[in-house]
Image: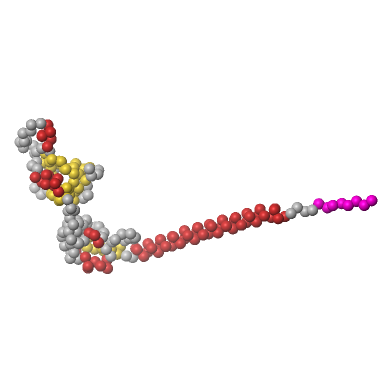
Amino acid sequence: MSVTTERPRPASTSTAASAPAGDKAGRRNGRRAAVGALLVVATVAAFWQIDLRRHAEEAYVATTRAVPAGQVVTDADLTTVQVASASGLALLPASRRSDFVGRTAAVPLAANSLLVEGQLGPAAWPPAGQAVIAVLVKAGKAPATLAAGTNVVVLVAPAAGQPATAASSPADAAVQVRRATAMVVSAVPGEQEPGSQVVTLLLGAAAAETVAGAAGDVSLVQSGAKE
């Protein structure tokens, strides 16, 4: 009698080998993605540094002092400054500085500020529907320091000792105090009264006429935003 003995066949290695192969492929893909990300970062950084160096060498036109709207710009009013990055800004290049001498300031130009094309040309100040007036503000009637661009509430009340107009009702009495909102254009010390200020204001045309025609003392209340 013969006995046949079957040897156990070795297990297929295809399944076992497939897992490590998949892991290796995943690791390779991960390394490629990481290298690609690093290349992108390096490219952006290099571009930023090149762009920064390029713009750092560019000069633009700036003012040396304040120039009122409507005044002709002279060479002494201008200077050139280096700007690290002017991307997205319509600044006036220093190479064209001579082109702007003799032109008119369309709006008030602040001292030590960079210029853009729209600030030069036919006078566009004050804007349509608005007016500029100057008021004398006595000491204690306004904040000690008023910077250009500050929003204020203008109050004009009868001066102390000044006879008030007879009022038939509380509402009529309130009308005697003129009120308007405005923006400070400039403020300089008054020459006649110690502590006083001469403040130039930008406000609506109708309100400007009301304030300019009102008799009394002017008070300015600084506000956070236009009303």
In the visual, does 224 lie left or right of 25?
Answer: left
- Tell me, yes or no, if residue 114 can be seen here: yes
Task: Judge whether 187 appears above or below 88 on screen.
Answer: above
Whether the magenta-drawn stretch holds residue 5 is answered as yes
Of 213 and 157, the residue lying toward us: 213
Across and down, in percent, residue 117 comes to 25, 61
Q: Residue at x 7, y 33 (%)?
A: 167
In the visual, does 86 lie left or right of 11?
Answer: left
Q: Residue at x 81, y 52 (%)?
A: 8
In the visual, does 87 lie left or right of 37?
Answer: left
- Tell me, yes or no, if residue 145 can be seen here: no
Task: Judge whether 26 appears above or below 219 on screen.
Answer: below
Q: Residue at x 53, y 57 (%)?
A: 34
Task: Judge whether 137 appears above or below 22 on screen.
Answer: above
In the visual, does 105 lie left or right of 21?
Answer: left
Residue 100: image quadrant is bottom left
Q: Residue furthest top?
A: 169
The quadrant the C terminus occupies is top left
Residue 114: image quadrant is bottom left
Of 86 and 204, the residue lying toward us: 204
What segment carries the magenta color?
Answer: 1-8
Across and down, in percent, residue 95 comes to 27, 68
Whether the magenta-drawn stretch holds residue 143 is answered as no
Q: From the image, give the main secondary structure of the stretch colored magenta.
A: loop
Q: Residue furthest front?
A: 1
Q: Residue at x 15, y 41 (%)?
A: 179
Across and down, in percent, residue 39 comes to 49, 61
Across and down, in percent, residue 89 comes to 31, 59
